[in-house]
Image (spheres, rainbow, N blue to C red):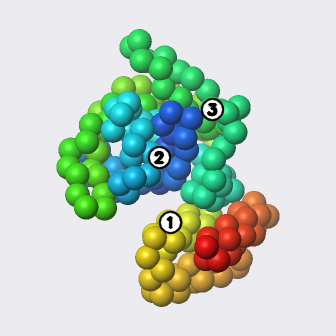
């Protein structure tokens, strides 16, 4: 199994018909995720003990799954050793993992991942795009910002939004517009 590289791999994680951007930490061959306690993803993983990493290079999907739910038809079921998992329909590759809660803290849980299966469906070359990376970064910061309203995170969101505007293409600009609508709605609450 080799889709994940050393470091933190940003993927769209799926659990039981739920999708969210997540980082999978790969250090010295050990795979982990750190999840916010109380999130749908954390609850589903603790209950079902599996997660699927979806390799998607669409900035709009990163934004949508961070702040909203996808429709049922966005998911596909896969059977692995008698266990049914779900992945996103439109992916280039996916990897399924057994997931065991290793540690539980006040705000987070740490989950150890064990590879079960991975499949490449239609891999394409993706040149480094700072606009795409900035959408991912702004989205990560925003998921934390809505929890604590830290002004430093607000500045990082503005910085990465500016980079996405400058360095991105039409899909990044669409993602940025969607992102800004979600943030406006969340900061009004």
Label 3, secondary structure: give it. strand
Circle 3 is placed at which residue position?
Answer: 75
* 3D distance between C-alphas at marks 2 and 3: 16 Å
In this rendering, the label closer to the viewer, 2 or 3: 2
The quarter of the rendered structure image containing the C terminus is bottom right
Circle 1 is placed at which residue position?
Answer: 143
Instruction: Say whether disc 1 or disc 2 marks the residue closer to the N-terminus.
Output: 2
Q: Which mark is residue 15?
A: none
Q: Residues within 10 Å of mark 3 (few under 14, many from 20)?
A: some
Q: Residues within 10 Å of mark 1 (few under 14, many from 20)?
A: some
Q: Position of residue 171 (x, y in %)?
A: 75, 60
Q: Position of residue 18 (x, y in %)?
A: 55, 41
100 sits to left or right of 184? left
* 3D distance between C-alphas at marks 3 and 1: 23 Å
Q: Nearer the viewer, residue 144 or 168?
A: 144
Circle 2 is placed at which residue position?
Answer: 40
Residue ID at (38%, 57%):
36
């Amino acid at each position: 199994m080799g889709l994940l590289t050393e470091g933190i791999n940003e993927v769209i994680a799926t659990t039981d018909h739920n999708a969210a951007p997540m980082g999978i930490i790969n250090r010295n061959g050990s795979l982990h995720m750190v999840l916010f306690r109380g999130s749908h993803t954390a609850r589903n993983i603790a209950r079902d003990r599996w997660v699927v990493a979806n390799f998607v290079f669409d900035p709009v999907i990163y934004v949508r799954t961070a702040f909203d739910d996808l429709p049922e038809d966005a998911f596909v079921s896969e059977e692995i050793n008698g266990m049914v998992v779900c992945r996103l329909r439109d992916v280039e590759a996916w990897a399924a993992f057994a997931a065991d809660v290793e540690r539980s803290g006040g705000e987070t849980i740490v989950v150890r991942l064990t590879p079960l299966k991975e499949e490449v469906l239609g891999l394409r070359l993706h040149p480094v795009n700072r606009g795409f990376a900035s959408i991912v970064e702004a989205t990560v910061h925003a998921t934390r910002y809505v929890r604590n309203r830290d002004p430093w995170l607000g500045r990082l969101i503005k910085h990465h939004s500016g980079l996405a505007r400058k360095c991105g293409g039409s899909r990044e600009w669409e993602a940025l517009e969607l992102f800004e609508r979600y943030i406006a709605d969340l900061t009004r609450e």
